[in-house]
Image: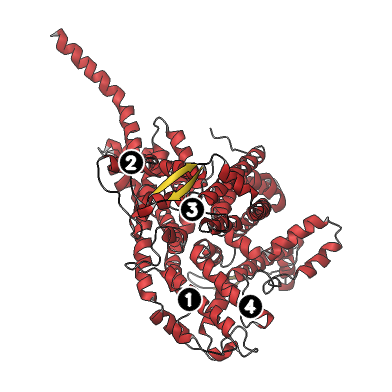
Amino acid sequence: MNKVNSPKIKRESKNKIKVDFERTNWFKRFRLRFLTGTSIAKGLTWLFRFVLLLGISYVILFPFYTKIASSFMGRDDFIDVTVKLIPRRPTLDTYKAVIENQGYLDGLLGTASLSFVCAILQTFVCAIIGYGFAKYKFKGRKLLFALVVFSMVIPHQTLRHSFYMRFQNFDIGIGEFGILKMFGIEQIDMLGTYLPMVILSITGLAFKNGLFIFMLRQFFSGVPDELEESAYIDGYGPFKTFFKIIIPISIPMLITVFLFSFAWQWTDNFYVDLFGLIDNKGIFLLNEIQGIPGILKVKGYPGEALFTAAVYSTEAILIMLPLVVIYLFCQKYLVQGIERSGIVG
Amino acid sequence: MTEVKRRKVHRRRRKAISLDRKKARAGWLFVLPFIIGLILIYLPIVFDSLNYSFNKIIPLKGGAYELNPVGFGNYQKALQDPEFTKVLVSGIKDLVFDIPAIVIFSLFVAVLLNKKIFGRAAFRAIFFIPVILSTGLISEISHSAMAGESYMGQTGAVDDGSGQGASGAEGIVAATDFRWLFQNMQVGSGLLEYVTGIVNDIYNIINRSGVQMLIFLAGLQSISPAIYESCSIDGATGWETFWKITFPMISPMILVNAIYTVIDSFTSSDSQIMTFISSKYGDVMGGGGPEISTAMSWIYFAIVIGIIALVAAVLSAYVFYQRRD
């Protein structure tokens, strides 16, 4: 080796010095850096991965795009065969009709209040129950947790008729025997009110609450015991510890659970139907906005079927929209909460 | 005086015991909501449901009803329904075939999303959209929308990727192209059918693997980076690292996810068996009714419990648990 690498001083001032190295020429450097086998392989895997993710994202997003596109299409676009994915005569008529004639705003209010109440209750109750399972050892804990899993495994469709009967003549007891009946109090008909949903939420029995309890239990088991011990030493009781120490550090996880229960309640079709919340005079839910508004019906219109589909798509978008907004705010916590839960082990 | 002393000692001893007991009591208090719900609502409901399945329900005036025991009559009727057995067999076949597809797909995507890549946050946000938006009401409306489109057939201006049946079959990969590709590879036609089926059903599979992806991601995050570092120092390739490190470490999650997939797909109201059972619920004329549909779903439940036990037994033989000291 000759002295290629000795630095050459180019310019020198009081506190600055500019040095020039004799460097290998740029092409050779480029070749050694980027055109080797490993780096090409790396680049290709990166590309492959990226394209794959892009492709799957496309599969997920495309149906949403077609829904959005068709919801803006005007009547003539459905007859025009050349119109594919971009509306040529964009119009807001479909939205207007659905919002004004199908009672969208009333439905929004009803569904939002129901979902919000249920989600808050479920998150809170499941957090309490999950914490109890994670941090306290008591007799029958394993059996009780097995029952939580059990409540997750039995589909509620199996219990459909029993749910209906139970909440139609609400009583505590089995079969003919009931506590309320024993005291001569009339059984309460809860169908057509929020009460059945609220009762199920308070007791951690509503849709997928077993999963929430499981997730939260895993999360709380990962919280170090020292945290609580130091709180006990400071004179906190178990409940004060839970509310003042544990809840604040588990906000991302709680938001995750809230998001799930909110979204699943929002799109729920089974329970609201079962508990008589649909076709009910007092309560109007988003489930009831389905259908074709009278204004949009035109006789002898050739694009009828497609147009009907587009109206349904519009309704689906309007139902999804609030959820999407909430999701965009919460999705940061979604992954964060799950990552910290450490479900492993 | 000795009396007082003894009492004092006695009291102190009781107090010493009660610390553990106090904690246990707090634990009971925390899970109390669930216990109350379980005893007062859930178990009676499960009992009622079983009870209905062994009885004939005769409605009386004013919402009351009378139960007429029929033994296993409802179950016999359910099993004699030719449509039910048909739906049951095909539904369970689908379920069994979907488990590996969903688990493998979600593991694959979770591994992809775990690596540092451009736009990872955006991809993650997109991939979890189906968890929120593909359930119940929205999927039902989408089905109504699709029914309209497929009525119009091929000329449709709106090509929905979620399409099943005639209009959407060509959606992502034309089955014929795929078949042609596989024919040269000399694999069995059974596997070929399976793979083409999955590829054409990819939308469905993506929609159903959201929670599983989240669980896998959580599992991947909890693997210590030090292990990967030591592997790369020893000269392991990415492929080797995956099979020797990631896979064993994630195997408990595979078990959890397989079981979750079974539970999720059979309790979801979208599954064809559940749809069938629900349709039987109100169909008293066509040999249905609440008691028959209850009996049917208990049969289904028993079978699925069997599948879960089988999956758990098979997978737990391969699961690797990291020893914790």
Residue B255 can be seen in this image = no
Q: Tell me if residue A38 comes above or below residue B52 in the rendering.
A: below
Say if labels 1 and 3 share a chain: yes
Which residue matches tag 2? A178
Determine the chain carrying the residue at label 2.
Answer: A
Q: Seen in the image, is A255 located left or right of residue B239? A: left
Q: Amino acid at mark 2?
A: Gly
Under circle 4, the secondary element is helix
- CA distance for labels 2 and 4: 52 Å
Determine the chain carrying the residue at label 3.
Answer: A
Which residue matches tag 1? A291
Say if labels 3 and 2 share a chain: yes
Q: Seen in the image, is A44 located left or right of residue A151? A: right
**Residue A339 percent across, percent down from the top left:** 50, 52
- CA distance for labels 1 and 2: 42 Å
- CA distance for labels 1 and 3: 38 Å
The residue most toward the left is B1
Q: Dot 1: few (<14), some (14–19), or many (≥20) neighbours within 10 Å?
A: some
**Residue B219 percent across, percent down from the top left:** 56, 48
Name the N-terminal-most of marks 3 and 2: 2
- CA distance for labels 3 and 2: 42 Å
| Point 45% across, 75% down: residue | A318
Which residue matches tag 4? B151
Name the N-terminal-most of marks 1 and 3: 1
Query: Which of the pair A321/A293 is nearer the observer?
Result: A293
Q: Amino acid at mark 4?
A: Tyr
Which residue matches tag 3? A338
Q: Dot 2: few (<14), some (14–19), or many (≥20) neighbours within 10 Å?
A: some
Q: Tell me if residue B189 comes above or below residue A324 in the rendering.
A: above
